[in-house]
Image: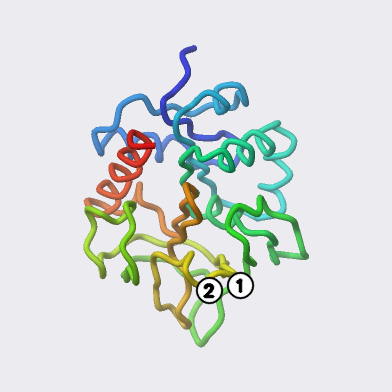
Amino acid sequence: MSVPRIAIVDYRTGNLRSVEKGFEAAGVQGVGVTDDPSQVENARGIVLPGVGAFRDAAANLRASGMWDVVVSRARAGTPLLGICLGMQLLATTGLEDGEWGGLGLVPGVCTRLTGPVKVPHIGWNTVETPRPSPLFRDTPSGSAFYFVHSYHLAPEDPEAVIGVTEYGTRFASAVRSGSVFGVQFHPEKSSAAGLALLGAFARIVEEA
């Protein structure tokens, strides 16, 4: 099997094929799902998707042999996009059903949503972009994306926040640390705005 240009990491969390189809719909070629760490090692870009619990996902990443590869490639400057649970795993620590170590690629804590709102947060909501980012280069501030989550990443560095959403409280719905990006929403389920974002990430990979 040839090495994908953009590798979608398979660590048994589901949602993989829909992300791959999202890239296809965005006109991006060379994207593939893989559970082979050597393919992730040699890809030009990495996508870390996921749905489910922080603890189980972290355990699966370690068991699959993907953990060290993802961290080393990201720290070497390979563009990485974490989606939903994949964004949460970028944190230093996750506080879902205990305290668990994350990848530490975007220092911060993954904590539960608060406020007088129903949790999980399910449905469309807007994302304001407080500072320019190549991930949102084709997506106007205030665009709507589709969310399904109960937890969110709260970065230590306010400058890491490139997208903000209001739901009970204002939370970081998109982050960046160097070549590492994360979005709490599902771009693959977010119509034209989501496809534009996936296309923008592909351009980041090409430009790296």
Residue situated furthest top in the rendering: 1
The kind of secondary structure element at disc 1 is strand
Q: Nearer the viewer, residue 15 or 35?
A: 35
Residue 10 spot, x, y in % from top left = 57, 34
Q: Which residue is mark 1?
A: 112
Q: Which residue is mark 2?
A: 119
Quadrant of the rendered image containing residue 133 = bottom left
Residue 169 spot, x, y in % from top left = 48, 82
Q: Are marks 1 and 2 in contact (CB under 8 Å)?
A: yes
Tell me if residue 44 can be seen.
yes
Residue 9 spot, x, y in % from top left = 54, 35
Residue 195 spot, x, y in % from top left = 27, 46
Q: Nearer the viewer, residue 53 or 80?
A: 80
Q: Is residue 5 left or right of residue 13?
A: left
Which amino acid type is shown beneath numbered disc 1? Answer: Arg
The kind of secondary structure element at disc 2 is loop
Q: CA distance from mark 1 to mark 2?
A: 9 Å
Which amino acid type is shown beneath numbered disc 2? Answer: Val
Residue situated furthest bottom in the rendering: 116
Mark 1 nearby-residue class (10 Å; few <14, some 14–19, many ≥20): some
Residue at point 48%, 43% (across, down): 80
Residue at point 30%, 56% (across, down): 136
Which of pointers 1 and 2 lies earlier in the amino acid sequence? 1
Quadrant of the rendered image containing residue 204 = top left
Mark 2 nearby-residue class (10 Å; few <14, some 14–19, many ≥20): some
